[in-house]
Image: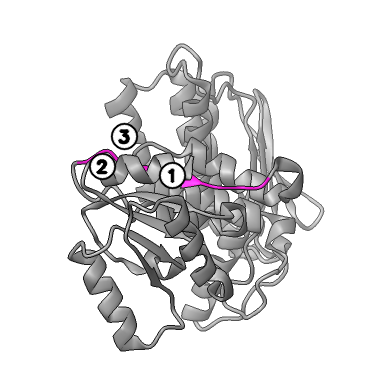
Amino acid sequence: MIREAILREILRGGQVYLLHNEVKTIARAARELEQLVPEARVGIAHGQMPERELEQVMSEFYHRRFNILVCSTIIETGIDVPTANTIIIERADKLGLAQLHQLRGRVGRSHHQAYAYLLVPPPKQMTADAHKRLEALQAADQLGAGFTLATHDLEIRGAGELLGDDQSGHIAAIGFSLYMELLERAVHSLERGGDVEIDLSARPDCEVNLHIAALIPEHYIPDVHTRLMLYKRLAGTADAAALRELQVEMIDRFGLLPGEVSHLVRVTALRQRATALGIVRIEAGPEGGLLEFSQHTSVDPLSIVRLVQREPQRYQLRGATILRFVEQMRDADTRVNTVEALLEGLATAR
Protein backbone atom coordinates (compact mmCIF):
# COMPACT_ATOMS: atom_id res chain seq x y z
CA MET A 1 0.00 0.00 0.00
CA ILE A 2 2.86 2.37 0.85
CA ARG A 3 4.58 1.64 -2.46
CA GLU A 4 1.36 2.22 -4.38
CA ALA A 5 0.70 5.53 -2.62
CA ILE A 6 4.26 6.77 -3.22
CA LEU A 7 4.36 5.74 -6.88
CA ARG A 8 1.01 7.40 -7.60
CA GLU A 9 2.33 10.67 -6.22
CA ILE A 10 5.74 10.43 -7.91
CA LEU A 11 4.28 9.52 -11.29
CA ARG A 12 2.16 12.68 -11.30
CA GLY A 13 5.24 14.76 -10.47
CA GLY A 14 4.59 15.22 -6.76
CA GLN A 15 6.48 14.63 -3.52
CA VAL A 16 5.77 12.57 -0.39
CA TYR A 17 6.21 12.99 3.36
CA LEU A 18 6.74 9.76 5.30
CA LEU A 19 6.51 10.55 8.99
CA HIS A 20 8.56 8.22 11.18
CA ASN A 21 8.68 9.82 14.62
CA GLU A 22 11.58 7.76 16.08
CA VAL A 23 14.93 9.46 15.56
CA LYS A 24 16.88 6.33 16.56
CA THR A 25 15.39 4.25 13.75
CA ILE A 26 14.63 6.94 11.15
CA ALA A 27 17.76 6.12 9.09
CA ARG A 28 16.77 2.45 8.98
CA ALA A 29 13.25 3.41 7.91
CA ALA A 30 14.74 5.48 5.07
CA ARG A 31 16.86 2.54 3.90
CA GLU A 32 13.87 0.19 3.94
CA LEU A 33 11.91 2.75 1.93
CA GLU A 34 14.69 2.95 -0.67
CA GLN A 35 14.48 -0.84 -1.06
CA LEU A 36 10.69 -0.74 -1.26
CA VAL A 37 10.59 2.09 -3.83
CA PRO A 38 13.93 2.08 -5.71
CA GLU A 39 12.48 4.57 -8.21
CA ALA A 40 12.42 7.28 -5.51
CA ARG A 41 15.06 9.61 -4.11
CA VAL A 42 14.87 9.74 -0.31
CA GLY A 43 15.96 12.41 2.20
CA ILE A 44 15.86 12.54 6.02
CA ALA A 45 14.88 15.42 8.33
CA HIS A 46 14.44 15.50 12.10
CA GLY A 47 14.92 17.91 14.98
CA GLN A 48 18.21 16.50 16.25
CA MET A 49 20.08 17.27 13.02
CA PRO A 50 22.52 20.21 12.97
CA GLU A 51 20.76 23.42 11.98
CA ARG A 52 22.70 23.92 8.74
CA GLU A 53 22.20 20.32 7.66
CA LEU A 54 18.47 20.46 8.37
CA GLU A 55 18.17 23.72 6.44
CA GLN A 56 20.02 22.18 3.50
CA VAL A 57 17.76 19.10 3.45
CA MET A 58 14.59 21.15 3.52
CA SER A 59 15.89 23.44 0.78
CA GLU A 60 16.70 20.46 -1.44
CA PHE A 61 13.27 18.94 -0.79
CA TYR A 62 11.59 22.24 -1.63
CA HIS A 63 13.53 22.46 -4.89
CA ARG A 64 12.57 18.83 -5.70
CA ARG A 65 16.08 17.35 -5.65
CA PHE A 66 14.49 14.30 -3.96
CA ASN A 67 10.86 13.28 -3.84
CA ILE A 68 10.42 11.49 -0.49
CA LEU A 69 11.20 13.11 2.87
CA VAL A 70 11.39 10.68 5.78
CA CYS A 71 10.87 12.99 8.74
CA SER A 72 9.75 13.45 12.32
CA THR A 73 6.92 15.73 13.48
CA ILE A 74 9.23 18.70 12.85
CA ILE A 75 7.31 19.31 9.62
CA GLU A 76 4.19 20.39 11.54
CA THR A 77 5.74 23.79 12.24
CA GLY A 78 4.38 25.42 9.10
CA ILE A 79 6.49 24.21 6.17
CA ASP A 80 4.66 24.90 2.92
CA VAL A 81 5.68 22.69 -0.01
CA PRO A 82 2.94 22.92 -2.68
CA THR A 83 4.25 19.92 -4.63
CA ALA A 84 4.06 17.60 -1.58
CA ASN A 85 0.54 16.21 -1.70
CA THR A 86 0.83 12.80 -0.04
CA ILE A 87 1.69 12.16 3.61
CA ILE A 88 2.12 8.76 5.23
CA ILE A 89 2.09 8.80 9.05
CA GLU A 90 3.46 5.72 10.79
CA ARG A 91 1.98 4.80 14.20
CA ALA A 92 -0.62 7.55 13.99
CA ASP A 93 -2.17 6.16 17.18
CA LYS A 94 0.77 7.57 19.17
CA LEU A 95 0.17 11.17 18.06
CA GLY A 96 -2.27 13.68 19.51
CA LEU A 97 -5.45 14.73 17.77
CA ALA A 98 -4.44 18.34 17.17
CA GLN A 99 -1.02 17.14 16.05
CA LEU A 100 -2.54 14.74 13.49
CA HIS A 101 -4.79 17.50 12.18
CA GLN A 102 -1.80 19.82 11.82
CA LEU A 103 0.26 17.15 10.05
CA ARG A 104 -2.61 16.34 7.73
CA GLY A 105 -2.64 20.01 6.78
CA ARG A 106 0.93 19.84 5.45
CA VAL A 107 -0.43 18.38 2.20
CA GLY A 108 -3.10 19.78 -0.06
CA ARG A 109 -1.49 23.22 -0.19
CA SER A 110 -2.18 23.57 -3.92
CA HIS A 111 -4.91 22.65 -6.39
CA HIS A 112 -3.90 18.96 -6.54
CA GLN A 113 -5.86 16.23 -4.80
CA ALA A 114 -3.98 15.34 -1.59
CA TYR A 115 -3.80 12.07 0.32
CA ALA A 116 -3.09 11.38 4.00
CA TYR A 117 -2.43 7.80 5.12
CA LEU A 118 -2.55 7.06 8.85
CA LEU A 119 -0.85 3.74 9.60
CA VAL A 120 -1.95 2.07 12.83
CA PRO A 121 -1.50 -1.37 14.44
CA PRO A 122 -4.42 -3.82 14.89
CA PRO A 123 -7.28 -2.32 16.96
CA LYS A 124 -6.55 -4.49 20.00
CA GLN A 125 -3.07 -2.99 20.29
CA MET A 126 -4.36 0.59 20.45
CA THR A 127 -5.63 2.40 23.53
CA ALA A 128 -9.23 3.59 23.89
CA ASP A 129 -8.12 7.23 23.57
CA ALA A 130 -6.27 6.42 20.35
CA HIS A 131 -9.49 4.94 18.92
CA LYS A 132 -11.37 8.12 19.86
CA ARG A 133 -8.73 10.36 18.28
CA LEU A 134 -8.76 8.47 14.98
CA GLU A 135 -12.57 8.37 14.86
CA ALA A 136 -12.71 12.13 15.50
CA LEU A 137 -10.16 12.75 12.76
CA GLN A 138 -12.09 10.63 10.27
CA ALA A 139 -15.34 12.44 11.08
CA ALA A 140 -13.86 15.97 10.82
CA ASP A 141 -13.46 16.40 7.08
CA GLN A 142 -15.60 19.52 6.52
CA LEU A 143 -15.11 23.26 6.89
CA GLY A 144 -14.61 24.13 10.54
CA ALA A 145 -12.91 20.81 11.31
CA GLY A 146 -10.20 22.55 13.35
CA PHE A 147 -12.65 23.80 15.97
CA THR A 148 -14.47 20.45 16.05
CA LEU A 149 -11.19 18.59 16.59
CA ALA A 150 -10.13 21.00 19.33
CA THR A 151 -13.40 20.32 21.15
CA HIS A 152 -12.97 16.55 20.79
CA ASP A 153 -9.38 16.85 21.98
CA LEU A 154 -10.52 18.72 25.08
CA GLU A 155 -13.10 16.03 25.83
CA ILE A 156 -10.65 13.15 25.31
CA ARG A 157 -7.70 14.56 27.28
CA GLY A 158 -9.62 16.56 29.84
CA ALA A 159 -8.70 20.15 30.63
CA GLY A 160 -6.56 21.21 33.55
CA GLU A 161 -6.20 24.38 35.58
CA LEU A 162 -6.04 27.26 33.15
CA LEU A 163 -4.10 29.50 35.54
CA GLY A 164 -1.94 26.85 37.21
CA ASP A 165 0.67 24.26 36.41
CA ASP A 166 -1.54 21.30 37.32
CA GLN A 167 -2.99 20.04 34.06
CA SER A 168 -5.25 17.44 35.64
CA GLY A 169 -7.41 19.66 37.79
CA HIS A 170 -11.01 19.28 38.93
CA ILE A 171 -12.50 20.55 35.70
CA ALA A 172 -13.61 17.03 34.75
CA ALA A 173 -15.79 16.86 37.87
CA ILE A 174 -17.68 20.13 37.35
CA GLY A 175 -17.62 20.55 33.56
CA PHE A 176 -15.92 23.06 31.31
CA SER A 177 -18.84 25.56 31.19
CA LEU A 178 -19.14 25.84 34.96
CA TYR A 179 -15.36 26.10 35.30
CA MET A 180 -15.28 29.01 32.85
CA GLU A 181 -18.20 30.67 34.68
CA LEU A 182 -16.37 30.40 38.01
CA LEU A 183 -13.19 31.72 36.44
CA GLU A 184 -15.02 34.69 34.92
CA ARG A 185 -16.72 35.43 38.25
CA ALA A 186 -13.38 35.35 40.07
CA VAL A 187 -11.74 37.67 37.54
CA HIS A 188 -14.60 40.18 37.79
CA SER A 189 -14.43 40.11 41.60
CA LEU A 190 -10.70 40.81 41.53
CA GLU A 191 -11.16 43.62 38.99
CA ARG A 192 -13.66 45.28 41.33
CA GLY A 193 -11.19 44.96 44.19
CA GLY A 194 -13.32 42.46 46.11
CA ASP A 195 -12.69 38.96 47.38
CA VAL A 196 -13.13 35.92 45.19
CA GLU A 197 -16.37 34.10 46.02
CA ILE A 198 -15.42 30.47 46.61
CA ASP A 199 -18.89 29.41 47.79
CA LEU A 200 -21.16 28.68 44.83
CA SER A 201 -24.20 29.55 46.93
CA ALA A 202 -22.91 33.04 47.70
CA ARG A 203 -24.96 34.52 44.90
CA PRO A 204 -27.21 31.88 43.32
CA ASP A 205 -29.43 32.57 40.35
CA CYS A 206 -33.00 33.45 41.19
CA GLU A 207 -35.64 30.75 40.73
CA VAL A 208 -38.69 32.26 39.01
CA ASN A 209 -42.03 30.42 38.86
CA LEU A 210 -44.98 32.49 37.67
CA HIS A 211 -47.12 29.50 36.66
CA ILE A 212 -47.38 30.70 33.07
CA ALA A 213 -46.39 29.21 29.71
CA ALA A 214 -42.84 30.45 29.18
CA LEU A 215 -41.18 28.29 26.53
CA ILE A 216 -40.14 28.02 22.87
CA PRO A 217 -42.92 26.07 21.13
CA GLU A 218 -42.26 23.52 18.40
CA HIS A 219 -44.38 25.38 15.86
CA TYR A 220 -42.11 28.43 16.22
CA ILE A 221 -38.77 26.55 15.97
CA PRO A 222 -39.26 22.94 14.77
CA ASP A 223 -35.62 21.85 15.20
CA VAL A 224 -35.10 20.54 18.75
CA HIS A 225 -31.32 21.21 18.69
CA THR A 226 -31.90 24.87 17.79
CA ARG A 227 -34.46 25.21 20.57
CA LEU A 228 -32.05 23.74 23.13
CA MET A 229 -29.27 26.08 21.97
CA LEU A 230 -31.57 29.09 22.36
CA TYR A 231 -32.64 27.98 25.83
CA LYS A 232 -28.97 27.78 26.78
CA ARG A 233 -28.21 31.18 25.27
CA LEU A 234 -31.18 32.76 27.06
CA ALA A 235 -30.05 31.30 30.38
CA GLY A 236 -26.51 32.55 29.74
CA THR A 237 -27.37 36.19 28.95
CA ALA A 238 -25.58 38.40 31.47
CA ASP A 239 -27.63 41.60 31.27
CA ALA A 240 -30.61 43.31 29.65
CA ALA A 241 -28.57 44.42 26.63
CA ALA A 242 -27.50 40.86 25.81
CA LEU A 243 -31.07 39.63 26.27
CA ARG A 244 -32.41 42.35 23.98
CA GLU A 245 -29.81 41.49 21.34
CA LEU A 246 -30.79 37.82 21.44
CA GLN A 247 -34.46 38.76 21.20
CA VAL A 248 -33.79 40.83 18.06
CA GLU A 249 -31.83 37.91 16.57
CA MET A 250 -34.71 35.49 17.21
CA ILE A 251 -37.20 37.83 15.55
CA ASP A 252 -34.86 38.27 12.59
CA ARG A 253 -34.32 34.51 12.17
CA PHE A 254 -37.71 33.03 13.06
CA GLY A 255 -40.27 35.85 12.96
CA LEU A 256 -42.30 37.69 15.60
CA LEU A 257 -42.20 36.08 19.04
CA PRO A 258 -45.28 34.07 20.06
CA GLY A 259 -46.77 34.77 23.47
CA GLU A 260 -44.95 31.87 25.14
CA VAL A 261 -41.56 33.07 23.89
CA SER A 262 -42.29 36.67 24.93
CA HIS A 263 -43.11 35.40 28.40
CA LEU A 264 -39.86 33.39 28.45
CA VAL A 265 -37.86 36.50 27.55
CA ARG A 266 -39.60 38.58 30.21
CA VAL A 267 -39.13 35.87 32.85
CA THR A 268 -35.42 35.76 31.96
CA ALA A 269 -35.25 39.54 32.43
CA LEU A 270 -36.96 39.15 35.82
CA ARG A 271 -34.41 36.51 36.81
CA GLN A 272 -31.54 38.83 35.89
CA ARG A 273 -33.01 41.73 37.83
CA ALA A 274 -33.84 39.61 40.87
CA THR A 275 -30.41 37.96 40.94
CA ALA A 276 -28.77 41.40 40.92
CA LEU A 277 -30.91 42.36 43.92
CA GLY A 278 -30.02 39.20 45.83
CA ILE A 279 -33.45 37.56 45.53
CA VAL A 280 -33.28 33.77 45.35
CA ARG A 281 -36.91 32.87 44.64
CA ILE A 282 -39.97 34.44 43.06
CA GLU A 283 -43.35 32.73 42.95
CA ALA A 284 -46.61 34.19 41.69
CA GLY A 285 -50.08 32.86 40.97
CA PRO A 286 -53.60 34.18 40.32
CA GLU A 287 -54.05 35.46 43.91
CA GLY A 288 -50.54 36.64 44.79
CA GLY A 289 -47.01 35.42 45.37
CA LEU A 290 -43.79 35.77 47.34
CA LEU A 291 -40.20 36.98 47.14
CA GLU A 292 -37.43 35.22 49.07
CA PHE A 293 -34.28 37.22 49.81
CA SER A 294 -30.79 35.86 50.30
CA GLN A 295 -28.61 36.77 53.25
CA HIS A 296 -26.51 38.96 50.94
CA THR A 297 -29.40 40.90 49.37
CA SER A 298 -28.73 44.47 48.34
CA VAL A 299 -32.31 45.53 49.10
CA ASP A 300 -32.54 47.80 52.15
CA PRO A 301 -34.43 45.88 54.89
CA LEU A 302 -35.97 49.15 56.13
CA SER A 303 -37.57 49.72 52.72
CA ILE A 304 -39.26 46.30 52.96
CA VAL A 305 -40.48 47.09 56.48
CA ARG A 306 -41.89 50.46 55.34
CA LEU A 307 -43.63 48.72 52.42
CA VAL A 308 -45.34 46.30 54.82
CA GLN A 309 -46.30 49.08 57.23
CA ARG A 310 -47.72 51.23 54.44
CA GLU A 311 -49.89 48.47 52.90
CA PRO A 312 -50.32 45.68 55.49
CA GLN A 313 -53.27 44.15 53.62
CA ARG A 314 -51.18 43.72 50.49
CA TYR A 315 -47.71 42.89 51.86
CA GLN A 316 -46.73 40.56 54.71
CA LEU A 317 -43.39 39.30 56.05
CA ARG A 318 -42.96 35.58 56.69
CA GLY A 319 -39.86 35.09 58.75
CA ALA A 320 -36.76 37.14 58.05
CA THR A 321 -36.38 36.46 54.33
CA ILE A 322 -39.81 36.03 52.68
CA LEU A 323 -42.09 38.85 51.53
CA ARG A 324 -45.60 37.77 50.54
CA PHE A 325 -47.89 39.95 48.44
CA VAL A 326 -51.59 39.70 47.59
CA GLU A 327 -52.73 40.74 44.12
CA GLN A 328 -55.32 39.65 41.59
CA MET A 329 -53.25 38.42 38.64
CA ARG A 330 -55.44 36.19 36.51
CA ASP A 331 -53.55 36.47 33.21
CA ALA A 332 -49.88 36.03 32.44
CA ASP A 333 -49.16 39.63 31.38
CA THR A 334 -50.63 41.05 34.60
CA ARG A 335 -48.54 38.61 36.63
CA VAL A 336 -45.30 39.60 34.90
CA ASN A 337 -46.12 43.32 35.07
CA THR A 338 -46.85 43.09 38.82
CA VAL A 339 -43.57 41.36 39.62
CA GLU A 340 -41.65 43.77 37.39
CA ALA A 341 -43.17 46.76 39.21
CA LEU A 342 -42.39 45.24 42.61
CA LEU A 343 -38.74 44.63 41.68
CA GLU A 344 -38.47 48.14 40.28
CA GLY A 345 -39.80 49.57 43.54
CA LEU A 346 -37.34 47.54 45.63
CA ALA A 347 -34.45 48.52 43.36
CA THR A 348 -35.17 52.27 43.58
CA ALA A 349 -35.63 52.06 47.35
CA ARG A 350 -32.06 50.79 47.93
Q: Earlier in the sequence, mark 3 or mark 2?
A: 2
Residues marked 3 and 2 touching at CB (< 8 Å):
no
Q: Which residue is mark 1?
A: 3
Q: Which residue is mark 2?
A: 11
In this rendered view, identify the residue nearer to me: 322 or 11. 11
120 within the magenta span: yes
Q: Residue furthest right?
A: 319
Colour style of the rendered protein structure? one colour
Q: Is residue 258 visible in the rendered structure shown here?
A: yes
Q: Earlier in the sequence, mark 1 or mark 2?
A: 1
Q: Which label sits in the foreground, 3 or 1?
A: 1
Q: Identify the element where label 2 is drawn.
A: helix
Question: From mark 3 to mark 2, how far is it between C-alphas?
Answer: 54 Å
The segment highlighted magenta reads 112-121
> Dot 1: few (<14), some (14–19), or many (≥20) neighbours within 10 Å?
few
In this rendered view, identify the residue nearer to me: 337 or 275. 275
Residues marked 1 and 2 touching at CB (< 8 Å):
no
Q: Is residue 245 visible in the rendered structure shown here?
A: no
Q: Which label sits in the foreground, 3 or 2?
A: 2
In this picture, is 103 found above or below 45?
Answer: above
Three-letter amino acid code of the residue under disc 1: Arg
Tag of residue 79: none
Three-letter amino acid code of the residue under disc 2: Leu
> Dot 2: few (<14), some (14–19), or many (≥20) neighbours within 10 Å?
few
Q: Which residue is mark 3?
A: 249
Query: What residue is at 72 percent from the left and 47 percent from the top?
Result: 128
